[in-house]
């Protein structure tokens, strides 16, 4: 069954409805509410540039269609995240793990594909705890491959073994798609930077090796990020240099086939989740605000920190958990009401 047949079978919406719902999803997740001055008036411009570079349509829908085209039962998808610092974010941050967990669950529910998750070795416990909170079980990879609604969390190397490790992971698990959510990538000089333009710590996991090797093998890729230093933004380096402070220095060289910028990377993942729910006609695959709060709490309990303040509090990029919960609620309503047909006002 090809993508068009899959969508026609599971949803009665028209292409025009898909486009309209996708625009609403994109608009919501690109509302800027960041605490940092270096993140203001940035994401809207990066989103517009990414739209122009990718044909002009809603990017959430573009990513969801990519997922449905390449994934299905018996397929594997790699999803990676990880932004941190030994001093301020020693177990990673609250942006990234919830997005990975929610999208991994949605992909499995929508396609039957097996998600395998990758991050820095010190962040594995954080990502695992967050993933359990969304309702995905944690198993050894050999068990996750044939057990529904489970996944595995695997470490990524930061040293000279990273390229060999990436090839090994690809050889062993044969992903049909690789996805990055809030994962910092290096610039053209091989130096990775934080969102403020500071070089990252030396133990940053080299996830770019997964994407470089996937590109060599013709495996498609999806990047989701919020500042221009994350894997995927190599697709629009001129826009990052123009609109992001220190953008020319911090923009990653690593491009992906599809790029989704959002106010936070979590929100970008939720946008793709919502688009998957629309295209499959399954609003129920969207996670709830209650689950969103549970994920953030689990992430912080596992020593994840707010990426803007470095504090172990219920915030994501300087925004309280209630903000993320509200966005999830609004996305769910956009999906549900957008798919509703036949409604007539009684008066």
Image: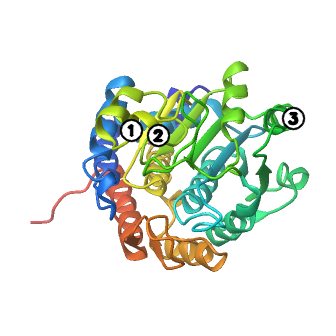
Q: Is residue 339 above or below residue 216?
A: below
- Name, please, the residue furthest toward the right: 142
Residue topped by disc 1: 247
Q: Residue at x 62, y 76 (%)?
A: 298
Q: Quadrant of the C terminus?
A: bottom left
Q: Quadrant of residue 44?
A: top left
Q: Secondary structure at mark 2?
A: helix
Above or below 288: residue 255: above
Left or right placement of residue 41 versus residue 7 in this view: left
Q: CA distance from mark 3 to mark 1?
A: 33 Å
Label drawn at residue 168: 3
Colour pattern of the rendering: rainbow
Q: Picture coordinates of residue 192 (x, y %)?
A: 57, 42
Asked if the residues shown at circle 3 and circle 1 are in contact, with their CB atoms under 8 angstroms apart, the answer is no
Note whether 251 is above or below 128 in the view shown.
above
- Position of 81 relative to 168 (above/below): below
Assess whether mark 2 and mark 1 are in contact (beta carbons under 8 angstroms): yes
Label 3 Cα crowd, 10 Å radius (few <14 / some 14-19 / many 20+): few
User: Which one is nearer the viewer's eye here, 329 or 255?
Assistant: 255
- Is 211 situated left or right of 68 in this image? right
Query: Element type at marker 3?
Result: helix
Q: With 249 as the anchor, is 253 left or right in this view? A: right
* In contact (CB < 8 Å): disc 2 and disc 3: no
Figure quadrant of residue 148? bottom right
Residue at image position (69%, 69%) is 132
């Amino acid at each position: 069954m090809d993508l068009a047949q899959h969508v026609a079978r599971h949803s009665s919406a028209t292409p025009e409805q898909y486009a309209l719902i996708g625009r609403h999803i994109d608009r919501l997740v690109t509302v800027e509410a960041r605490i940092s001055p270096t993140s203001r008036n940035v994401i809207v411009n990066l989103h517009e540039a990414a739209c122009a570079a990718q044909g002009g349509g809603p990017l959430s829908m573009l990513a969801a269609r990519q997922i449905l085209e390449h994934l299905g039962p018996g397929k594997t998808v790699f999803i990676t995240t990880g932004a941190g610092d030994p001093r301020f974010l020693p177990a990673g941050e609250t942006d990234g793990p919830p997005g990975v967990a929610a999208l991994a669950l949605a992909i499995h529910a929508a396609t039957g594909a097996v998600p395998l998750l990758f991050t820095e070795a010190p962040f594995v416990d954080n990502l695992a705890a967050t993933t359990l909170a969304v309702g995905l079980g944690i198993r050894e990879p050999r068990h996750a491959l044939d057990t529904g609604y489970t996944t595995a969390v695997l470490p990524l190397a930061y040293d000279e073994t990273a390229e060999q490790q990436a090839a090994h992971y690809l050889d062993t698990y044969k992903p049909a798609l690789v996805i990055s959510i809030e994962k910092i990538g290096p610039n053209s000089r091989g130096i990775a930077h934080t969102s403020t333009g500071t070089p990252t710590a030396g133990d940053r996991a080299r996830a770019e090796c997964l994407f470089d090797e996937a590109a060599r093998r013709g495996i498609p890729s999806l990047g989701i990020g919020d500042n221009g230093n994350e894997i995927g933004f190599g697709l629009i380096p001129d826009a990052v240099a123009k609109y992001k402070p220190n953008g020319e220095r911090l923009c990653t060289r690593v491009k992906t086939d599809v790029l989704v910028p959002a106010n936070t990377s979590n929100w970008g993942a939720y946008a793709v989740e919502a688009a998957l729910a629309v295209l499959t006609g399954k609003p129920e695959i969207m996670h709830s605000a209650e689950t969103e709060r549970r994920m953030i709490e689990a992430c912080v309990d596992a020593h994840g920190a707010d990426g803007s303040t470095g504090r172990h509090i219920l915030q994501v990029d300087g925004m309280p958990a209630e903000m993320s919960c509200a966005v999830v609620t609004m996305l769910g309503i956009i999906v549900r009401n957008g798919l509703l047909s036949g409604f007539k006002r009684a008066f």
